[in-house]
Image (tube, helix red, strand yellow):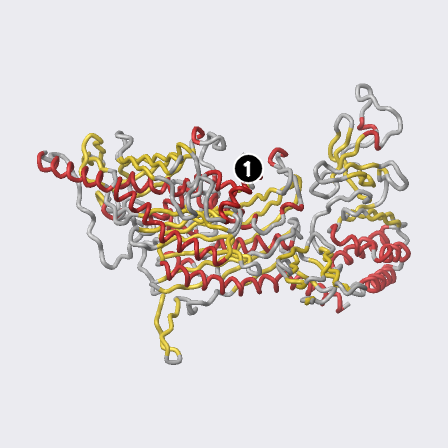
Amino acid sequence: MGGGAGEKPVLIRWEERDGQKVAVRHDGRLAAQLRPIRMEVGVLSNADGSALVEYGGTRVLAAVYGPREAHPRHMALPDRAVIRCRYHMAPFSTAERKTPAPTRREVELSKVIREALEAVVLTELFPRTAIDVYMEVLQSDGGTRTAAITAASLALADAGIAMRDLVAGVAVGKVDGVLVLDIDEIEDNYAEADMPVAMAPNLGRVLLLQLNGVLAHDEFVQAMELARKGIQTIYKLQKEALRRKYVEVVQEGDEQ
Amino acid sequence: MVRIHVQSRSIVLPGDIIAEGNDIVVESPFIERKGNQYYATITGLVNVQQLEDGKYKISIIPLEGAYIPKSGDIVIGLVKDIGLTHWEVDIASPYKGILTIQEVLDRPFNPAVDSLKKYLDVGDYIVAKVVAFDRARDPLLTIKGKGLGRIVEGSIVEIKPSRIPRVIGKKGSMVNMLMNETGCEIVVGQNGRILVNCPNKDLEEIAILSIKKIEVEAHTTGLTERVREFIREEKARRGV
Amino acid sequence: MSITPPFQPVVPKLKRYTMETLLSRGVRLDGRKLDEVRKIEIVPSYIERAEGSALVRLGQTVVLAGVKTDIVAPFPDTPNEGVLVVHAEFVPLASPTFEPGPPDENAIELARVIDRSLREIKAVALDQLVLEPGKHVWRLFVDIYVLNHDGNLFDASMLAAMASLLSARLPVAVKTEDGYRVDRGRFTRVVPVNRRVVTVTLAKIAGKLVVDPTYEEEQVADTRMVVAVSDDGRIAGIQKTGMGDLEYREVLSAVAIAVNKASIYHKALEDMVLPYRAKIEEELRTEKTEEAVGGVVELQPAPHREHEEPVEIAEVVDEEGQSGEEGSRE
């Protein structure tokens, strides 16, 4: 949160729609509306699995290598695979250049994303190996960690790594007193709260949860419900994206 | 009471519910049970089969994923390091293959006067068999046996190991068709590496293209006939 | 890069079993109830050389925090605010699992969670730490030193950070030709605090939520939830930390329990730190009236301009990493 030095833009307008007062956001979205979301699986030829995910202007590329031999060897664990996870922002992804060196923020986010993935990946199937998950934020427009974990889980599925469920994430914010789904950067800059959530939707499990900002208790409960609904939608899109990869091949095959 | 949520031979994804009920037999490490519900944990083709006793057998053939060695598997390995009495072999797996001198030579070997390099060098391809593997130690290989040993001619095609069953086909139907149609000799490694040895360059190209086509379309039906047609068209086009 | 950590000291299965059996009966290994916090002890101003400090004991866990100050240029996007920096060190003497070296991801995470919980609710009145807007502001360093790790470092560290800020005094800023010099021998006022914030940590063990976990309990726990709660009962931050997961309803109960239990920590601050703060405030008042303030410059807080949105330090501004990164700042 905090904000740009400039004048605060109008982030919420109240409009009459069908005789009801409705909060409309600066980009025309309603409070519980996601940005346009795009997902593509298998975008990199070298990686064992990969995915590109866009939440509006936020664009994240994720690649998975592994399971592969753990280097250095002493890092390997005898009864499971280790997960090595890196969330990183490209220097050109932000308004002002971000230093390419890993920041404390990136260290923390790499950790919470790894811990979220540990809960779903069946690491016990691949003892003594490493599963590397790399996430590069190519363009940042709010919600990058949740887009990153959505992309990472697609890349893991694409790599054929066994998981209890896919992981989908979205950030809920409180902007001018209104709880909004999938906040973008402008909203985040002036938000009273930003709450990234990631879940394994079919299992009903919460894997990542952070709250940066201030919410009353009842607002928190509503924000969780809003996040859960958004996550269900994103989960459907994830499954479509994974299936699409095979459907396209079938159609190509049929033409011949 | 059993409820099946998927069509047999359809694609399932991690988190997809496959079936629920009590009379279900699971035959795959990639299916998780939660209560009496069964979930897929991997991208793959699901198989549902009703058994004679009325139970349902469910399994998943993964469409992606790394090669995990099994004893008895034929693999194609690349020698990547030489120790005093063993070679380390890259077998396109999270686990590297170990080939000891005893599995290569029949006579005693003295590392003080003899060098392993003479027999197999870094960069050599071998056709090997997995002798033992338990995931606690690296898999042990042998090249003693018919058809095993250093590869001296031909080309290696590398595909996703998960697609190998399709390259082989039911009882070898696909690979036999490939060999008959192209006249190439083909050795299929379970680890996704395939050795092709062909009468000429054109036929080698056709064989490789066919294998790549099988890799990409592995989850589709009627594949053998499509590939046969493809080979014939290519042969006609190239005049071979 | 974050890597699955190697195994901590192995927890004997027998102990795990005992713990789980006890928990199912609503008791813990050390006899506490599931929602019971260990004994809290706070010693304000434990380090006299620091501008503010506090030693916190939470059961066997010991955390020391110190506040140091200097005068710097404000961040360009927050010209009317002082600077707050939170840093944590897990020193090797505190636990066999801590290694010497720069802070690892655990120490960084802890410092950042405490930083956010203080910053978002404006616990410290940074707008009152300005000497000359856009030019010279106070910078407060809160350094957290974990001295003995027996679990729940978050709550103990947050208490120590809050207590050290509450017991901190601002030194005299002496005007020089090109700026200001800090005279640490004399003090002008206490560090202005708007809100008091504490965190409440819950661990999920065998499907039960326990408050204020010990080290042993953390080893067995699936995962933990850290919930920051302000003295007016609002939620000022949340962090799920650790590898496992929580059911949706467990998240809701964890937060509800935390909001409820926060009062215990707040009471500890009220009982053990606020009297000290009142005492130093009184001392500073009497000193001021006795002493002439020659050469001492202590400006009033910058007038708050209405059209400006209250803005905060960029370390949090770049929550999604836009303007200048924090690397240079932390």
Q: Residue furthest top?
A: B112
Give neighbour class at mark 1: few <14, some 14-19, many 20+ (Cα, 10 Å). few
**Foreground residue among C137 and A191:** A191
Give the residue type that dot 1 points to.
Val
* Residue C97 percent coordinates (x, y): 49, 33
**Foreground residue among A217 and C36:** C36
**Quarter holding residue C47:** top left
* Residue A248 percent coordinates (x, y): 68, 65
Point 41% across, 61% down: residue: A221
Give the quadrant of the N terminus of chain B: bottom right
Q: Which residue is mark 1?
A: C11
Give the quadrant of the C terminus of chain B: bottom right
* Residue A166 percent coordinates (x, y): 59, 57
Q: Can the viewer see residue A138? A: no
Left or right relative to C28: residue C118:
left
- Of helix, strand and loop, which one carries label 1? loop
Q: Can the viewer see residue B160? A: yes
Q: Is residue C302 above or below residue A251?
A: above
Image label count: 1
* Residue C80 percent coordinates (x, y): 26, 48
Q: Chain of mark 1?
A: C
